[in-house]
């Protein structure tokens, strides 16, 4: 997800999206532990997307 797309999301929706992505990341890690994922870079991408969303969330909260 691009930074410009994340900035358009409201704070409440962003919090919900972060939680959903965290659940998705946990399930990906669990699946990868059981049997290797075909493309392990998806785990890296998910982790970075969560970090990007958290950064923008903090910026929005500090502005309010």
Image (cartoon, rainbow, N blue to C red):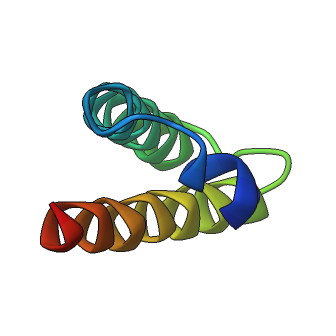
Seen from this angle, which residue lies furthest right? 38
Q: Judge left or right: residue 4 versus residue 61.
A: right
In this view of the protein, can residue 1 be seen by the observer? Answer: no
Q: Assign the C terminus to one quadrant of the image.
A: bottom left
Seen from this angle, which residue lies furthest front? 64
x%, y% of residue 63?
A: 22, 70
User: Relative to the observer, which residue lies in front, 37 or 26?
Assistant: 26
x%, y% of residue 52?
A: 49, 69
User: Relative to the observer, which residue lies in front, 54 or 27?
Assistant: 54
User: Relative to the observer, which residue lies in front, 32 or 51?
Assistant: 51
x%, y% of residue 31?
A: 51, 34
x%, y% of residue 9?
A: 51, 37
Q: Quadrant of residue 55?
A: bottom left
Q: Judge left or right: residue 25 versus residue 37.
A: left
Q: Judge left or right: residue 49 versus residue 26.
A: right
In this view of the protein, can residue 56 be seen by the observer? Answer: yes
Q: Residue at x 33, y 30 (%)?
A: 23
Q: Judge left or right: residue 19 versus residue 43.
A: left
**43 in relation to 55, above or below:** above
**58 in relation to 1, above or below:** below
User: Relative to the observer, which residue lies in front, 49 or 58?
Assistant: 58
Tag count = 0
**31 in relation to 53, above or below:** above
């Amino acid at each position: 997800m691009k930074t410009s797309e994340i900035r358009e999301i409201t704070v409440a929706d962003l919090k919900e999206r972060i939680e959903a992505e965290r659940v998705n990341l946990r399930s990906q890690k669990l699946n990868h532990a059981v049997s290797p994922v075909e493309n392990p870079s998806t785990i890296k991408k998910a982790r970075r997307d969560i970090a990007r969303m958290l950064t923008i969330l903090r910026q929005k909260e500090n502005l309010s």
